[in-house]
Amino acid sequence: MKHYELAVKFYKEKGPRHDQALWAIRQKRDKAVKEVPEWESLRQQASEIKDYVIENLQNLVDEFIKNAKNEGIEVVFAKDAKEHNQTVLQYLKEINAKKVVKSKSMLTEECGLNEFLEKEGIEVIDTDLGERIVQLRGEKPSHIVLPAIHTTKEDVAEILGEKNTDPTYLTHKMRELLRKEFLSADAGLSGANFLVANKGWAVVCTNEGNADLGAVLPPLHIISVGVEKLVPNMNDLGLFLRMLARNATGQKITTYTSIFGKKENGKRVIILVDNGRFERLNSEFKETLKCIRCSACLTTCPVFRRSGGHAYRYVIPGPIGSLLGPLCDKEEYKDLPFACTLCNSCEMVCPVKIPFSKQLVKMREYVTKENIALKLAEKSMHYPQAFKLFSTILRLTPKPVLQAALKEWSRYKALPSIPQSRFIK
Amino acid sequence: MKIALHVPCYINELNPEIARKTLLILRHFGLDVSVPKNQTCCGQPFINSGQPSTLPQQFNEIFKDYDYIVSPSSSCTSTIRSQELEVSKKMYELCEFLHDILQLKNLAKNYPKKIILHNSCHSLRHLLEGAPSELNIPYFNKIKKVLGDEILEAKRDECCGFGGVFSVKEGVISYVMGRSKLDDLISTGGDVITGVDYSCLMHLKGIAEKDGDNIEIKHISEILYEALEL
């Protein structure tokens, strides 16, 4: 099913509540952002740092690998999802791991790591509250920061087999269940929000501390991270940390912001993943590599708020997903850049100033196969006479025929009446 | 000052009165305004459908010798402005032109009805004719300035759901977005909804008509035309 069908299905069930919940977060975000008088200049700086990062990506990767190794971290470069998954498996097999605890990582979703490890007989427990909810429901996250925003407290009570739907009660219940998993896991897996090139450190931001438990308790911690998450130094990191939580959820900073170097009680591995990113550097979509996955473009998107994230089908939904999805599979996700009114709200909230409208329009062209009718129409519009002919045809077409031709419009809206004469005759 | 009136293709077909009134408003302020007869379309419907178009280049050829091109549509204006053409910086949406170039304000202060302004996305988030709620910049709204202080606005400055090709590809979501926009606008207690983009207004009008809302919807040029008693 395509976005428009899934969107209708979701909207009928949960649309208005979902819209309200996310609009409330958008308002929290606005308030938090407006507490920082220099916000707009921070966006400009962040955008420039990210431009620098993507222009110097190979150098920063080399610098990071050198410094992380000096720090005592093992670093592996994986060229694609398959290589990434194999690498994770190899490390887990070395210690004969049977169970791993994982904190939220969109990259492992991109690589399909959970399914891969489960096929290999390794149990994967997602430990982020929202991610655990969707995992138990047999779903994928519907939002990259609020993975279970499409569910209700009743849904959560149901999967936990509880009658009590009080959110605090349910959270404590989940905490109890997850604590056992943390204590019995053989390894911890996580993503990273940033990598600091000149230090060789990985930075993980969470609100639940689950990544920290996974990083510290088991003897092995594997961090899977896309190469574009690099920042040059700690000053730059400071800037991004100021922006990330405010823009994502309206918090001043995430509850847990941890910087990981060498692991004192075991082994830490960082898998740097390319999976098409270096190739994208040379494409017209290279600016998508600036994304820090703050999720503000999802939350603000008026279409996303009503359609829900699952309608996009790709692991990353919303405006940024409508660019990343078709880059991953052009045919499968060709509807996504059209699930958008080009309202430009995404561009306005983007902390690194990705030019969303321009990129989405380019993406529409990228996914659109040559359409002879459209091409001819475009050509004919160069001639006022052809335009006039079209206009005459429009006026001669009976209203029911127009209504049938524009059925998506006329199902919910009256067609405008067409006046007899034009201004430019 | 040589000025050209841009007549958006959909306005020429569906509401030519908007073009006529825009022309009369500009002439009312003593301007020398021409209407190039060979103009067709700025190319936006094609570009936004994923079809490359050279119509913006043709637009440039037709309009490049004028000092300003004034358009009763922020949507067409932003299509041209986002291109790197000679005309890009010379094209203005009507209210933007009245505000920035003629520096006029309070033109509708004696208008007998309470006006509700629908800030369209192309006006607010592409041309920045006002401060979008997403940005941390001081509040301003050029269209409100041109009309007068008493203008009402919706609580959420979000998209009305028209989106051109979106309105036919995603009819349901387009409708629910339009419905909530209309509810928001009507709840201000005003009498007449206006805006600089007839495309959004046509969409809202279509919904209002089908759902039986009792609200007047008029393009900004129609409001100014009446307010200036032309």
Image (cartoon, rainbow, N blue to C red):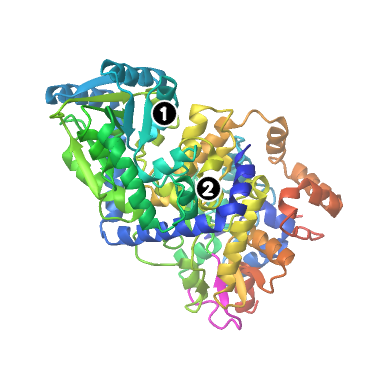
Quadrant placement of the C terminus of chain A = bottom right
Q: Is residue B27 visible?
A: no
Dot 1 crowding, Cα within 10 Å, few <14, some 14–19, many 20+:
some
Left of B176 or right of it: where is A62? left
Query: Mark 2 falls within which chain?
Result: A
Q: Nearer the viewer, residue B46 or A221?
A: A221
Q: Is residue A278 left or right of residue A300?
A: left
Q: Nearer the viewer, mark 2 or mark 1?
A: 1
Give the image quarter of residue B23.
Answer: bottom right
Q: Is residue A65 left or right of residue B14?
A: left
Location of residue B187 with respect to A412 vertically, above or below: below
Residue position marked by numbered label 1 in the rendering: A114
Q: Magenta segment range?
A: B104-118
Q: Amino acid at mark 2?
A: Gly
Disc 2 versus disc 1: distance between alpha carbons?
23 Å
Query: Mark 2 and 1 residues: CB-CB less than 8 Å, in contact?
Result: no
Query: Is residue A354 a member of the stretch shown in magenta?
Result: no
Q: Quadrant of residue A211?
A: top left
Question: Residue A316, located in which quarter of the rendered image?
Answer: top left
Question: Where is residue A401 shown, x and y percent of the image?
Answer: 84, 49
Circle 2 — which element?
A: loop
- Quadrant containing the N terminus of chain A is top right
> Looking at the magenta stretch, what is its main secondary structure?
loop
Q: Residues within 10 Å of mark 2 (few under 14, many from 20)?
A: many
The residue singled out by tag 2 in the image is: A308
For the point 57% across and 63% down, which residue is it? B181
Q: How many marks?
A: 2
Residue located 27% across and 28% down the image:
A187
